[in-house]
Image (spheres, rainbow, N blue to C red):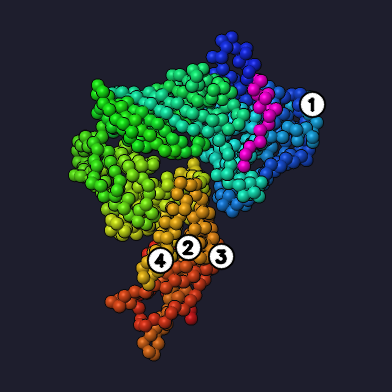
Amino acid sequence: MGRSVTDSGALALGLFLALITLEAPEGRAQEVNELATWVRELRASAPDPSRTATVEDLTLRRDEGELHFARGILQLFTPIDGRTLGAVFVGEGTFRMTAPEAVEQAQIRRLLETDGVDQPFRRAVLLFTDYSDDELAQHVTFGPGPPAPDGRREIEEALKYVSDDKGWFAETLLTPVLNGIGGLFYAHVAWDRGDPIMFEVNPTISEEVALYRKGKGRGDFRETVARFHRQSDYETGSSLPQEGLDLVRVEAYDVEAWIEDNLDFRGHAELRLTPTGSYRWIALSLHSDLEIDTLRWADGSPVAHDRPEESSALWIDLSTAPESGADLVVDYHGDILEQRNGLWVEMRAGRSWIPVYELGRPIPYHLTFHHPEKLRIATVGSLVSEETTDETVTSVWQTPPVRQMTFNVGEFEEHRPPDLTGRTLTVQYDKGAHRQLVGMMPEGVILFEQQDMAGAVSRDLTRAFHFFDEVFGPTPVQDFVASEIPYSHGEAFPGLVLLSWSTFQYTSEKGFDEMFRAHEVAHQWWGIGVRPATYRDQWLAEGFAEFAGLWYAARVNGSIDMYNKRLKETREALVRRRDRAPPISLGTRTATVDEPEDHQLVVYQKGAWVLHMLRTLLTDFDSGSDDLFGRIMKAFYSELYGKAATTAHFQAIVEREVGADMSWFFNQWVHGSSIPKYTFSHRLEDQPDGSVKAFVRIRQERVPADFSMLVPILIDFGDLGTAVVRINVSGPLTEAELPLLPQRPDRLEFNPFEAVLAETDTEGWKGG
């Protein structure tokens, strides 16, 4: 869905800013201050003593939220350039809200410990760019009157949650205000000095409706409780890929970067911009350690802009662009490179080493690096040319449209293994840093060093490419680089992975490093080849890659014990967090201030569990074939390659290939957070002909009454082999008679192969 723009609001703001510019004695150069002036005005918002109203039995409804003002004093804010942007209320009222999705309803219960929001309040502060001022004027009469008690203090308290300690507002709030985009409604309500809750409808965010609570910890900040689309979006079936949220499109980048011997960095970036409407202010992101030297349009004219102190936000005034186009040129420098402990070079800026527009689509890059001969560069894209002059290397790179751009640099040696995959593989590692690290260890501390670091890593990368080509379908990546970083994690980009130093230094445990390396390779398929459409679908990248690493370790590296051990470890962690941890489909929001580790546990590890369970569920135990699961993965990759994929896309392909409704599976394991506890018992009854009847009983606990799962039972006949049958476990108690057994088995194992994520116990048979 697009946005509605209040033309009169945008015009008024434009006149206001133009007046400030005209009054500035130094002319255009003073335009850099006008945004800060506007922010200060907003930060100083106060009740207007001439616009006070006594309110009784007034209700404002915004989407799923309802504010009922029972009785009290309501004052509008003092206008800013003729615009009324808020109101403050002191009295008695109630805020009510429901969520349209089961996942969000569960999250409200989890964080607020209530089924629905029904919150009394005595203080309310409203911010808006919608029709609220007109609606209020229709129901109450404003005029001089007694002020709302502590009205100014209530406003200050509310604004703390949407601004930083320098007074700059959150970009998501400031963008609609500055650009006159209608539809913003924000309410901050509290019972006296108790912790507030906040409700927001914001047309510039993909999921426009949100509920927040006061974040736990130091300072005043918001923590998301629930977030979802507007009612109208559900009615029309709208989703993020259909919504045009970019205020500007970045069409291409041309970037030049210089790295000195002492690792000083400077950059020159040219951005080809296309505004998508009559928007004035946009926010780019440039790392806070990078200082801007010059900022101009392509014709050389200056750019009106502002940048909050110690912030990565860079606000650009598009209205100052020349008629010839809005191409932006930025020169900057800063300390984003540092040699960590005298060993590896740390690049701290991530993606924001160039001015980034966060909502941007895939963009082509032309990159030029200048650096000392002792250093080597790894980046996204193909090397076009490289030459060395006076011990300085100049390399030129070109990329197709990509969503993320980074680089890595260091005193690397490069290893290129024999061509085993039809690809060019380059492994970069700092051999000298590893030797130094071993020598720096305190006496008695031994840090093992692999004799063939690059060989061990490249063998895994090569085999992982072979395996994933086979099970997922071939990826078009031809040139692939693995580069070492001084961190404990890995990162993946098109044709590039950044791997932790530790995976080069030693193998800590058989199978773990192999899984780690394969996980990062798998992102060429999951996360890059097929990318998650929204934050809710992040498991399609991280959970899929985590499973791929496990699958690789078991099938290619022969680490089946590590595979099972890893599943057992994560099962135990997930069982400990059952019901308290959010579901997979909450994506990045699974991490909270209280439980930040839930993101790794749920999105990565439970996501891998879901694929493991699906594969086990679809395996033909008679033949041992998992071909059906393989067809699903290949179909998903081939049909969604280069596209934004949702969980619904994956479910649809699963259902098509299986030929059955699989909503029960996805509702329980992706959109739900329950984990069953099974208690298994069985009874054997010998028959006159030597055959055996087997009766089984399963008690199911800790899940909803309709929770069901097909669970295998392994029947072990000793030297004669094994058989597997599946039981549909549903409800509190499941009893069944197994097919007649040819002889008495040595044992029956319920839920073998870690087939179902569950807590499993056994007990003796009770009763008849």
364 vs 616, nearest the viewer: 364
SS at mark 1?
loop
Q: Nearer the viewer, mark 2 or mark 1?
A: 2
Residue 311 in picture, x, y percent from top left? 48, 27
Which stretch is magenta? 1-16
* Secondary structure that dominates the magenta span: helix
446 with respect to 27 (left or right) = left
Task: Specify whether 705 is left or right of 152.
Answer: left
Per the rendering, the mark at residue 143 is: 1
Q: Earlier in the sequence, mark 3 or mark 2?
A: 2
Q: Residue furthest bottom?
A: 688
Image x and y of residue 80, in percent: 67, 23
Nearest the eye: 39 or 495: 495
Nearer the observer, disc 1 or disc 4? 4
Identify the amino acid type marked 2.
Answer: Glu
State the mark number for residue 619. Answer: 4
Instruction: Between label 2 and label 4, give the one nearer the viewer.
Output: 2
- Relative vertical location of residue 236 with respect to residue 404 in this rendering, above or below: below
Residue at left offset 76%, top offset 28%:
52
Q: CA distance from mark 2 to mark 4?
A: 13 Å
Measured Cα–Cα span from mark 3 to mark 2: 25 Å
Quarter of the picture containing the N terminus is: top right
Amino acid type indicated by mark 3: Asp
Left or right of residue 552: residue 278: right
Q: Quadrant of residue 611?
A: bottom left
The mark that comes first in sequence, 2 or 1, is 1
Of circles 3 and 2, the one toward us is 2
